Image (tube, grey):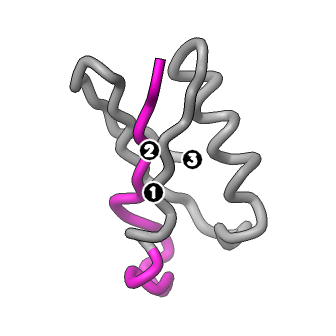
Amino acid sequence: MDYTIEVVSAMPPGVNHGHFPSWKRIIKAKNVYDALSQYKQQMAYKLPSNTHFTVKITDANGLSEEVVL
């Protein structure tokens, strides 16, 4: 299934929100946990390590949930 993952907020708030649109990814995965794991691996070099991100993950059926990474 395809999952769309996009960053919606970050803590601490000093992160440049202008980057959020470029951090959106569409990932093929078996389930939501696999999708989030793939996202973290793909984005490890871009996302500041000392920051917690809230991401919105949406499946192919349009169901979505926000998760903190």
Residue 23 falls inside the magenta stretch: no
Q: Disc 1 or 3, which lies upstream in sequence? A: 1
Please report the residue visible at 37 percent of the width from the left and 64 percent of the height from the top. 9
Residue type highlighted by circle 2: Ile
* Left or right placement of residue 34 versus residue 24 in this view: right
Residue type highlighted by circle 1: Lys
Q: Look at the numbered disc 1 and give the secondary structure of its residue.
A: loop
Please report the residue visible at 50 percent of the width from the left and 63 percent of the height from the top. 23
Q: Residues within 10 Å of mark 2 (few under 14, many from 20)?
A: many
Q: Quadrant of residue 27?
A: top right
CB atoms at circles 1 and 2 under 8 Å apart?
A: yes
Q: Nearer the viewer, mark 3 or mark 2?
A: 2
Q: Disc 3 or 2, which lies upstream in sequence? A: 2
Q: Quadrant of residue 31?
A: top right
* Left or right placement of residue 11 versus residue 69 in this view: left
| As drawn, 25 above or below 50 | above
First to last magenta residue range: 1-19
Q: CA distance from mark 1 to mark 2?
A: 6 Å
**The label number, if any, that marks residue 5 in the structure image:** 2
Task: Residue 12 in the image: state x and y as whole percent.
Answer: 50, 75
**The label number, if any, that marks residue 24 in the structure image:** 1
